[in-house]
Amino acid sequence: MYATGNKKMLNMLILEILREYTDEEHSLTQQEILKLLEQNYGMECDRRSVKNNIIYLKELGYDISMDKGYRLLSREFDDAELRILIDSVLFSKSISSRQSKALIEKIRGLASKYFNAKVSHVCNLPDLNRTVNKQVLYSVDTINDAISGKKKISFVYNSIGVDFKLHPRREEPYVVNPYQIVANNGRFYLIGNYDKYDNVAHFRVDRMTDVHKLEAKVKPMKYVPELVNGLDLPKHMAEHVYMFSGESIAVEMKTTPDMMTELVDWFGTDFRLIEKSEDYIVARVKCNRYAMRYWALQYGPYVEILKPESLRDQLREDIDKMAEKYK
């Protein structure tokens, strides 16, 4: 909140009024600006002062139209960009309801009242399947600091109990080399290396509590076999569709041409069609073994895994167990 009654702040107060009450389709007259200055900030001035300060704001680079009233034409974010930001917060499962509402209010503060009238319903949406962890945003901040400073982190890793609360998986904290935070399926994940091993590990940030940046330096990626050439994030995400850790394998699957949309949604475009006809296609993808197992079960009626044989055997065992449950 700006100080009121201070004429030196007049240009900033006028700018705030233009932000809130104008856009490309809505303008204010000098008289309306004077009324809002007095009503919102207890500031009195004359029409000449309004015009002079708006000219000064234009000289500073603000895109203000003075044709048929005064309007702020461009902002840091346009309405479409703000809507994307709001939707991203709304449907993020990694942010608590309280934090989500606070963030949305901050985003709405960047827009005019006309935009806010169009998105007022977002505050009335029922709570989604959000995290019970209130520390997520603080954890993200700490992890980012550690990644930037090339430091290890420690944290408690939790599971959710039958009481719907977080419970530590073990007494001693994990010590991890953090490399990247990614968003996947509405959750934040940390891509890193568990300090005792040389493989890539994934951790859900909303399951992490008591996150601390350590003084110890991070293990360079070149000492992690999967990351010798650095982290190719698009490739990594395509191979780890469920963010499981472990090896990636070459998989051949048989499905129908109308499954192409699903294949691209999950694996991107970095896979090959080694056979195709009007009735079926055979695709070769590289994917994490455990992720492919669950993906194949999810799309079981529409996909047949051809190779590797070990994965076919695992799926056959899974299907037999499922069939037994539904007898």
Image: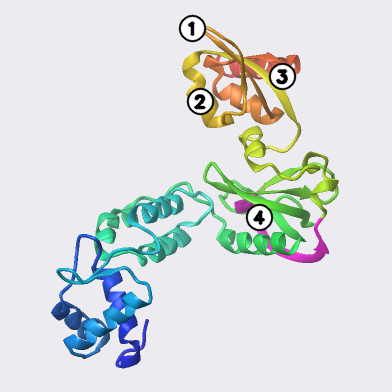
Residue for badge 2 = 262
Cα separation between marks 1 and 3 = 27 Å
Our reading of the magenta stretch's main secondary structure is: strand
- The residue sitting at 36% across, 88% down in the picture is 3
Residue for badge 3 = 311
SS at circle 1:
loop
Quarter of the view holding residue 27: bottom left
Label 4 amino acid? Met
Range drawn in magenta: 204-218
For residue 244, above or below residue 280: below
Query: Which of marks 3 and 1 precedes in the sequence?
Result: 1
Residue for badge 4 = 208
Residue 310 visible to the viewer: yes
Mark 1 neighbour density, 10 Å: few (under 14) some (14–19) many (20 or more): few
Residue 243 visible to the viewer: no
For residue 226, above or below residue 286: below
SS at circle 3:
helix
| Residue 18 image point, x, y percent | 27, 72
Residue for badge 1 = 278
- The residue sitting at 77% across, 54% down in the picture is 177
Query: Which of marks 3 and 4 precedes in the sequence?
Result: 4
Label 3 amino acid? Leu
Q: In the rendered structure, does residue 205 fall within the stretch colored magenta? A: yes
Label 1 amino acid? Glu
241, 233: nearer the viewer: 233
